Image (tube, rainbow, N blue to C red):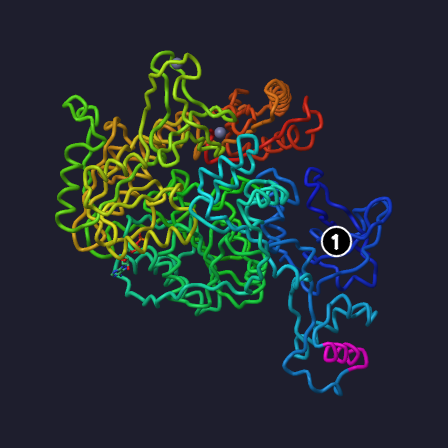
Amino acid sequence: MGFAEIIIDHKSSSVDKRFTYNIPSDLENQAKLGVRVVVPFGRYNKPIMGIIVEMKDDSSISYKTKDIIQVLDDKPLISEKKIILANWIKEEYLCTGYESMQPMLPPGDFRDITTMVVPGESLNNFNNHSEEEKIILSEVSNASKIEYTELQNICQNKDFNKLISSLEEEGSIKLVLDIRKTSTSRVEKIVIRNQTVSFDKGVEIIGNSAKKQLKIWTLFKGTNEIAANEILKQLNTSLSVLKAMETKNLVLIENRIVNETPVSKDIPEYLKIELNTDQKRVYEGICHSNNNISLIHGITGSGKTEIYLQLVEDMLRNGKDSIILVPEISLTPQTIDRFVGRFGNQVAILHSKLTQLERFDQWRRIKTGEYKIVVGARSALFAPFNNLGLIVIDEEHENTYKSSNNPKYDTIDVAIRISELENSKLVLGTATPSIETYYRTEIGEYSLYELQNRATRNSLPSINVVDMRDELQEGNRSIFSKILYQEMVNALDNGNQIILFLNKRGYTGFITCRSCGYVSKCDNCDISLTYHKSTNRLRCHYCGDTHTLPSSCPACGSNYFKSFGIGTERVEEEVRKLFPDAKTLRMDSDMIKSREDYEKALDSMKNNEVDILVGTQMISKGLDFPRVTLVGIIAADTTLNLPDFRSPERTFQLVTQVAGRAGRGDIAGNVILQTYNPDHYSITTAMTNDYKLFYSNESQLRKEFGYPPYKGIATVTLFGKNQLHVKESMEESALELQKHIKNEKLVSIDVLGPNPAPLERINNNYRWQILLKFGYNDSKLIKNIINRVYNKDKGKIKHDDIKISIDINPSSIL
Ligand code: ADP
Ligand code: ZN
Ligand code: ZN
């Protein structure tokens, strides 16, 4: 007799528990890892649904357990390997069991899924079957589609599952997954903006007190329709808020029937390119290496994508599946076009804009092998392939690969675990490897392949650094240095395109009073507000709240306001002033709200309808426009001054990536980099395109100050509305943590803090933090301790109006 551990209900994720149930003998054949079951729960034995996540034999259970009532699937909904993976994620990132399962589960509510039995191709002759089989076959052929569980009830046979398997094998029946509430879930609520109301008018109608409505209204800037579910999820609000806006005549809520397969635009075929000798060396190396993990360190435009494509082709030939991860699906249309253009309908594109039903449909088709290739953002890593051969992580250095919600997993580390479980290859690609990744090539964990030339045989653009302090001394108060201005004139004269990059949106940075020093800050966050000229409002870039621009200082009444810093809106305005005849386009998240907006912008760039493109990091990656000859980096320092140990790395990456947009065609590219820190090693090494020198500088510092890859780090952040409660809870729990560390004699561990987090207040939540640094040998022990204090003994934390965020190897410590 056996037992099964089951995960149930996802609503009460604060209670992280598995429940043990007895497997009655008549279900022995059916109960296995990853299948869904119905079990009696609670005092009144209410039947509920769960998933088996561990099988146990009787010797380990001494207490009385209840029986499983029913098994709902013939095959595991979640593969055994994925369950092993979930358990690993739980240990590694200290989340709850249910959270660790979440990425593996089918989209939507797993309880709505049903296994259906339908006639197979060879269902015509009942005669050569046993009596038991005949019952099944006649039921299936009569009903033409019947629920697995219903059939099970009709048959009442102990060997039901065996019978089903053999009938499926011979082709008499087929089993397919479906969503039970099909008729209702094909309808989706769509919120449509009333276009006769201007944005500002809407703000007025909503008024100042209805903050949620204001946030929703802001979402409609630049787009007219959003799925209600999307809004509710994004802003964590309820349908009643939308209904209230409907009565104010700001929006209309419509029920719309959605198509099963999303319509996609026609993508032209992308023909295979013969690899050059450099690419071939890398391709062959990866194919024949004994090491499953490789890094392709190739400069921008070196033809990494073509290598990925041919590796995928190789997998197809061997009947294996591939997963391609990109940093952000909406910002990488060119990569998607190449994969779809080459492999057509074997590719599933996983993006978050799909409806629940569409997402489920894709999940099902991946599971049944209809798709062989998946392209998507980090969560595509969990695609339910049965025969995975390859994972590619493009632009592996991007911070979108670290999840910021539970489970707060690191995509590369999870991919390594998957490649171990599936024995598949893992290929990381980038022009600017993260320090951690490059370190692992140094110690031999990953194989390193380098591409130092552009595939098109063009050279990398030259980078000229301009010290903006000199410009100021020479009396140039413009945001453009003399040389940048001159180069812009030249590029326009020659009919070429220009990209201007600044990693800050809005018109100006913060606004301050010259008389008393007052700085306008957000009411909800400890963050200075950014002025947006187009809406004539001050906006918080953390919580999205907007405020009117005061005409005099709220603190002292003085009229002397001065703004510091500039944003893309201002850059665009200056460009239009200086070059009134040039066609200028701005791309930042104020302008680009959807994938459609983004694609439209790229199209106009492609069709030469744009001379000067101004943008934020949104334009830093992936773009391949042959007519861009000049890239101007307005201020390279925007990321450098953030109080985060990854700031130099971010700066190097951004500069290199943006510079890489220049000179991709036949004409040589030129980059002008403006900075106030021309001697910083991030800038000087980016200028000479010397990654290795940057790496040696940066890794030296990381070693000295005990940061990854030399030491592991973890942060624990407590947050809540009551400042004192947060502080006290953090201080007390930190003492507890220290006590455990002392008891375990963990000398390698540094505890920094508790301190207020660098961003102490976000969205009216006060935040206190401790930062732990530890030797990797102690990482298991330290995680146990954190888990003890902040998960298991959570109830002992001084105040209960506190939320806890644990982040292992966080991508940012702000
Ligand atoms: P990366 O991904 O390394 O930035 P891409 O894959 O975008 O580089 O390649 C840059 C350009 O070089 C693309 O336009 C691509 O079509 C072209 N390219 C790639 N491989 C070759 C090759 N072997 N011969 C000629 N052109 C190539
Ligand atoms: Zn003042
Ligand atoms: Zn704010």
Instruction: Return the x and y of residue 548 as percentages of the image width and height.
Output: 44, 28
Query: Along the line of sight, which residue is nearer the eye, 63 or 536?
Result: 536
Up/down of 271 relative to 596, above or below: below
Give the side of residue 563 with respect to residue 211, left or right.
left
Q: Provide the residue designation for mark 1.
A: 49
Region rendered in magenta? 130-143
Q: Amino acid at mark 1?
A: Met
Crowd rating for badge 1 (residues with CA inside 10 Å; few <14, some 14–19, many 20+): many
Magenta stretch, overall SS: helix
Up/down of 364 relative to 740, above or below: below
Up/down of 753 relative to 297, above or below: above
Instruction: Return the x and y of residue 520 as percentages of the image width and height.
Output: 42, 22
Instruction: Return the x and y of residue 167 as percentages of the image width and height.
Output: 70, 76
Q: Quadrant of residue 113?
A: bottom right
Q: Secondary structure at mark 1?
A: strand
Q: Is 623 in the magenta?
A: no
Instruction: Return the x and y of residue 234 as percentages of the image width and height.
Output: 54, 43
Query: Along the line of sight, which residue is nearer the eye, 355 or 176?
Result: 355
Residue 748 seen anywhere in this rendered image of the structure: no
* Quadrant (top left/top right/bottom left/bottom right) for the N terminus: bottom right
